[in-house]
Every structure is written in structure tokens, then in C-alpha cells.
Amino acid sequence: MEKNSVLEVENLTKIYKTGGIFFGKKFRAVDNVSFTLGGDSANIFTIVGESGCGKTTLARMILSLIEPTYGRIEILGKDIFKLSSKERSRWLPRVVQPVFQNPFEAFNPLRRVYPYLLHTSSKVAGIEDKNEAEERVNQALEAVRLSPDIAARSPYELSGGQVQRLSIARAIIPRPKLIIADEPVSMIDASLRMGILNIFKQLKEELDINFIYITHDLSTAYYISDKIAVMYKGSFAEVGEADSIFKEPLHPYTQLLINSIPRVDRKWVGKVKVTVTEVEEYLLPGCKFADRCPYVMDVCKRKAPPLIRTSSGVEVACWLYSDEKH
Amino acid sequence: MSANTLVLDCRNVAAYYELDYGIRVRAVDNVSLSVRKGEIVGLAGESGCGKTTLMRTIYRDIAPPLRLVSGVVRLQSANGEFIDVYGLSEAELKKMRAKVISYIPQGSMSVLNPTSRIRSQFLEIFQKYGRVDKNEALRQVKERLRELGLRESILASYPHQLSGGMRQRTVIALATIMNPSIVLADEPTSALDVVYQRGVVEMIQKIREMYGTSFILVSHDMGLHYQASDRIAIMYAGKIIEVGNTDDVFKEPLHPYTEGLINSLPRIGGSKKLEGLSGLPPSLANPPPGCRFHPRCPYRMEKCSAEEPPFFTVGDRQVACWLLEGK
Amino acid sequence: MALIPRVGVDTLKILGAGFARFSHIFLEVFRSSRPFRVGLIILGVLMILGIGVSSFSPFDPRRWYIVASNKPPSLEFPLGTTTNGQDVFWLLTWSIKNSLIIGFITAMVAAHVGLILGMIAGARGGLLDRILMVMTDSFVVIPALPTLILLAVLLRDVMSIPLMGLIISIFSWPWPSRQVRAMVISLRERDFIATSIFSGYGVMGRVLRDYLPYLLPWHLVNWTNTVLFAISSEAALAVIGVSILSEATLGVMIYWALNYSALFRGLWWWLISPVVTIILVFVSLFLISKGISDYSNPRLRWQVRG
């Protein structure tokens, strides 16, 4: 284990059972995912994937909101599923915090927002003095460029962008090491999105907070990420530096994805092939992309490819890049 | 018919939600928009700017509290005549639907009936609008699917058995089976991933090429408009503020809102720091006087808060902004 | 276990907020729902009769042969008299009081036990949840009426009105408890619960601040329904003769009227009075609970307001 890793995920798997007891099928929402986050300075690690690829399940596991079927998650060297219940409620929120997709779901609509902020400041950040606790809340609001009177209102009196900023403000109050942001801008108007992503960049630099940014939108992923993982049907297809993945995508799925981005500076060329079914493909023994892959080989249908490290430092789960001969 | 024939012509359309306590939400205010034959017109704007209300107004799918306050919506019927949509009887309106104009509301799942197979949903449309026997109808459906590159096997499936992208393409095939001259597609790709999005756009373009169908494509995604539409109309707070050829608008946006919107889009390969627009869209129940964008506008002048800008024509572009006065 | 809230300023504040939400719902329902207003008026009249008027009775109406027997309604005896020489009007006011007491005791005990156990089971999950649910399920499968009869017979010597309410409570909490648990479990998946966890709220904090406000309208409906259930259970026991036959309740009145073949002998006022009163109690409680549930179901609320 690296000494200063913030998050270490190893062989993480979540299996859901669908159907009855006898004819039920197993559905691997997250399949054997491993990665490490951390280093000398904070990073923004983006997990890109289509809806239903397991990225939200992965996020909820890192937040210890659901338990994995097997695998291990360590935050700052502690296995989060072996924490005592006291540590889980006291220590965990101090080091990791969530930001959710729908800002109006993130706060109880029957409550005001400010009590959440103050409670986070006094109970999670552990600031006992009330004035100091309020001071910390105000600092957080300033960091997301909101005036304190906005926090005193009910969520439904505010716009989506404002509530999402409040949600981010709450998350940074305990100065966590890691923020898990699940589609934080997908429900925000286009003209306000960049404002929120810029806040992430700024928090990373100024407060040294690591981010896991989960999205389906590759353009915003390119804009803020240091490292990107492309997720397909529960597994990582490709992991690496953002620049190298966009410049030279290796996995056929990543290539398809990057060629399909509705860019505003270049039109699509050629045609794209789209599949019919979804769930069944999870049951294939081999590579889950095999039936859509233009370069499919025999081995792809039999055996799932491991993550292979290439010379450029990118890791790719594809037999095309394996030296093994079959 | 020449290529420039209009199939849809909206003039000064205003549709308000009239609520209790005298509140009027001016969701669509004085909007003019026309669509030519075989053209894909993109309608862009942020959530709550009135895009969907405009579509429903054009389709005459409105019920109180939403009301057409003023303006005309005219469609070209099969024999080339222009018909006022709001002058039709219910029976005539029903005849127009599916054959002349078709509407795909947001969320493909809500359009398809989850309890019946795709086959019967196609046949239902024939029963309702066409008068052919079942085998003939089925033959036409199969031929259409083949032309559009969809597998025949989807006919035997239920909607939930199809992936999101396939479902959306099925909905479009359903909406165009009677060869309407114009299709209103409201956010047809919003719940889909980029690969499926591209599939849907390619199918729309194919339908346009093969059958000369016009589309109004509603989306908040500017990238999609750049890829898919011939012309683009930008809507802000209930008004269309700029209309022009898509490539021109993206190359040189003239309205400050369009400019802000396009400049805030991340570009792959670029490393410029992007700024969003400051401020928030106004409430449509109480919009600011003059130009509705003026509180957020970086080039605001005195005139902007006093008087509403008319459309200024620049080349084949129309822009509602005082900056272009006299140019 | 940190299940019992520490009584302090914080707890008082939450209770205050709870009361504020309660009054808010009450006023909102009162304003928007005609059935609720009608139900409240009927129940109000019944409560005035049972709690106010009954205390002015010139004698204990339970005693036999205190007035002339078998008199039809007249100015002297507004609702007539029974074969046993009881004044039906005064007997009815006492019966309303006792039946409502049984109903309210059951509702206070059973509805709250159900709510609290359901919330704790749902919010905490794990072992505690499983233990509580095994307990709940075993109460669900015990047949209610035979057991009630058995208990009523066994406890005959010490039976009193409040005890009756408590015995009926035993069978009125398990279903609500299951329902509350199911609602809490569906709320638990919502993002705002995760936000509460990461804002440092413990189980108790979440129960009071997140779950309770959502469950309150449902709880009020359940509360009224439990009153209904208790009054009808007591009446059912009384009619088969296992309630406290020396007391005055609506059920006991019906029992004696039937026992003396009141209707057959033309003494209709003896039987009609308690039956009509029970129907009025049911109608008023039903209207009240309908008003609240219409309010708590937003889809219906839109229809109500047009």
C-alpha cells in the first residue's frame, strides 16, 4: 500500500440477485474494481460510464451506504467496513463526504438547510464553540460564493444551482480528504455548470480535497479530471491520465465513447453501432464488450481480460494489449 | 414543392399559465418560429425556459391553466394548404395528428405502453389513424424497421426488454410511421448515453433524408444541436432570442446569452478556464422589464431595461438584442 | 443504546418543531378539506355530550330502577327509559364518554407503540430490526377476536374501562408498526438521509428530524383509525357479553337492549340511540381520517384544489 493513499479499493464486487430463489439470476453491478487515489497533492478522479454501469453503486459503497458482496475499501489506511459503529458515525464523515446528483433530494424538503450546515460544523468537524462553528459555516459558504442568508431558507425557495452549492458547502465544512460527487452537475443548467465545476477545481487546490467525480458527460470530465476511469457494465475498461485517454483511447469502448461525444467543435464522422439488450450481457463469462467490439477475438468471449498496464501508464482491460498468446 | 416550402409557421405565439391569485406565468411570450420542409431545427434553452410549453402549444396539447393568449400556429396540410391549428375542430385535429404533425414528449418510457408488445403499439396507430388491414399494416411496419436499420425482433418485445437507446429509436419509428411532415421531439436523447444519443440522432437524420420529414429537436445539450440541427433557435425565459444556421451561430454567437452559453461549453483538448454566466434565469411569473436577459448581461445598456428589443436581421440570422440595432 | 433521547434544550426544540408541524398540518387540513371540518364538528358534539354534559347527570345512570321503566321519549326523558329503569339519555352520555376513553387509550398506546417500534426497526436495521419484526409478526398471526374474548373472560374480576383499552391495544400496534417500518425503509434509501448521516446526525436525530415529519400525516390517520378499531372491538365484545356489563359503554347498551328484545317489544329508542351514536362516531372519525390522508397524498391534493 502506498503510504499517502487516501482511498484504496481492492477487488470490490457487488452482486444483486434478480428474480426468484430458484430461477434467480445474479447481477454483478460492480465487478472486481480496484484503484488507488492519493499522492503528494489532491486529485480529481473521474469515473465515466453510461447509466446503469454501476458507478453509483460504487459511489455508495465508498460512502459505506451499501456493503460490498466482497472486496475491500480503505480510507486513510482504515478498512471502512471494519469500523466500529462509533467510528463509522464520527470518523468517517470527517474524512469523506458526499455531493449528490439532485440537489433537491440531498436535503429533506421539510427542513431548512442551515441546521445541516451547523450540525456538520459542530458534530462532524467537532467545533464545540457555537460562534466558531458558525464561523466555519460562513467560511464554507464563502468558498462556494454564497451569501449566508441563502442558507437560512428552505430548499424549495432556491434554484438548483444554489442548492447544489449549499450541498458542496456542507460537504467541505469538516475539511474532508475525499468528496464523492455523483453526477453533481447533470441537473444544473448549462450556464451555471461551469461555476460549480470551477469550485471543485478551486477546492482541490486550496483545501487539498480529493474528488471522485462520477459522470456520464465526457466533456466536463475532460475539463476537470486529473485521472479518468472508464466504466463499462460494472468493471473498469480503462484507467489513466485524462490527457492520454482523450488523446489516445486504447479500449474499443473508450474509442466508441469518445467518438460519440456531441462536441461543439467537430462533427461526427461515420456511423455508430448500437446494441439491443442490456441486462443479459452482464452474464457473459468473457469481456462484456465482446458482442459490440469491432476487434473481437475468440479469447474475448471465453475469458474476462485483466487490467493491463501499457507503456504510456494507462491501464486497459482488453486482450488486444496482452502479450499472452492464446 | 420547392425545398424552401414552410411546413410550420408560428407567428407571435404567447401561451401563459393562468394560476390562482392572478398569477400569470408567461412560459411562451411572443414567439415566432418557422420550419422548412426537410429541415431539422434545434430548440435550445435551459430547463424552465418554455421549450416544452412551446412544443405543446404547437401540437395544441394544452389544457387549463395553460392557455394560448395570442398568435397563430399554421401547418401545411397534405394538399399544400396552410391550416390554422387552433381553428380546427377536435375531429379535424385528430386527423392531422400522426399524419401531418407528430409529437414525442419527454421520457420515452412514458410514451410506450409497458403492458403491450411493440407490435401491437404499431398496429394501434394504424387502427387509429390509417385504414389498412392488419397484415398490410404489419408489412409496412416491417419494411419501415428494415429501412431504419432496426431489428424485426423488437416487435415481439415489451418496452422494458429494450435498452434505453433502442426504446427511444422505437418511439421515433412509431411517431413517423404515418409519414408526418413534421415531428416535434422533446429531449429525445436526454436520458441516454453518448453512444445511444448518437444512434438516435443518426436515425433522425436518416428519416429526414429518406422521407423528407422536418423535425423540431428540443434539447438543453448544445453539443447535440451542433451535431444534429440545420438551424438553431435559442430560447431564454419564454422568448426566442436568436435564430440562425447552426454552424454560424456556433462560430459567431451574436446574442450575449448565446455567447455566454457557447463559451461555457467545455472543449476537449482545450485548457482554458471556463466561466459560467452569473446570476439566475428570471421567474416567468414576474419577468424583468425590457430585455429579459438584461440583469445577467455583461453588455447591458440603459435601453435594455426600458424597452424590449425586436428581432434585428443580420444576414439570414435574427437576433433580439439592442446591440445589433442599426447594424 | 442511544435510543432514548437525552432530555435537554435540543429535545425540547425538536418537540416544539414537531408540535409546530402538527398544528401546521391540522390548520392546513382544516382549511382545505370539507370532510375534515364536518367530521370534526360531529366528533366535537359527541365529545361535548360525553365529557361535558355527562358530568351534569343528576344520578348515576348505570343504576337500575332509578326511573320509571319502558317510557318512550318525552320531555322528562328525552330518549326514553329502559326496562331496567335507566334514563337512556344520561346512560348514552356516559356510554359515549367510556367508549371514547377506550378508543383514545388504545390509540394513544397502540398507535404510538407501533410508530416508535416501526421507526426504530426501520431506521436502525440489523439485529434489532429482526428481533422487533419477529415479535411484531407473532402478534400479527395471533387471531385477535378469540384471544380478546379469552383475555376478557380471564380478567373479568379486575376489568375496568382503561384496562379494556389496554387489552385492545395489544392487537392494534403490530400492523401499523410493520407499515411504519416499510415507509422508513423506503425513506432510508433517499439521498437526504445520507446527507443527515454525513452531517453527524445519529439514529435518533434522523428519526426525529427526517422520518417523523414524513410519517406525521400518516400517523394522524392511523391514530383516528385505531380509535375506530378500539370502539368497534369493544362493541363486538359487549354484544357477545364479555365486556364489563355493569359499566356504560355503547356496546354494553346494545347488549342489554338486545338481551331484553327491545326492538321486538317496541322499545326502539333503547336500541336505536346507541346504534345511531356508534354510526356517528364512525362517520366522524372516517371523515377526519379521510381529510388528513387526502392532504398527505399530494396527487389527490391537486385534485381537491382543482
Image: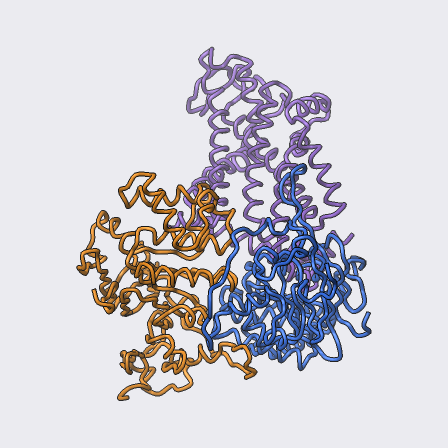
Picture layout, residue B193 above or below residue A222: above
Q: The purple chain is which one?
A: C
How many marks the image carries: the answer is: 0
Q: On the picture, is B66 further left or further right than B118?
A: left
Q: On the picture, is A71 further left or further right than A186?
A: right
Q: Quadrant of residue B257?
A: bottom left
Which sits in the foreground, A97 or C66? A97
Picture layout, residue A44 above or below residue A50: below
Q: In which quarter of the image is residue B36?
A: bottom left
The percent coordinates of residue C6 (x first, y second) are: 74, 57
Residue at the top extreme of this rendering: C265
Figure colour of chain A = blue
Picture layout, residue A78 above or below residue C167: below
The percent coordinates of residue B8 (x first, y second) are: 26, 63
Which sits in the foreground, A277 or B192? A277
Q: The orange chain is which one?
A: B
The percent coordinates of residue C241 (x first, y second) are: 62, 18
**What's the residue at 44%, 60% (across, down)?**
B200
Which sits in the foreground, A111 or A59? A59
Picture layout, residue C164 above or below residue C70: below
Q: On the picture, is B217 further left or further right than B269?
A: left
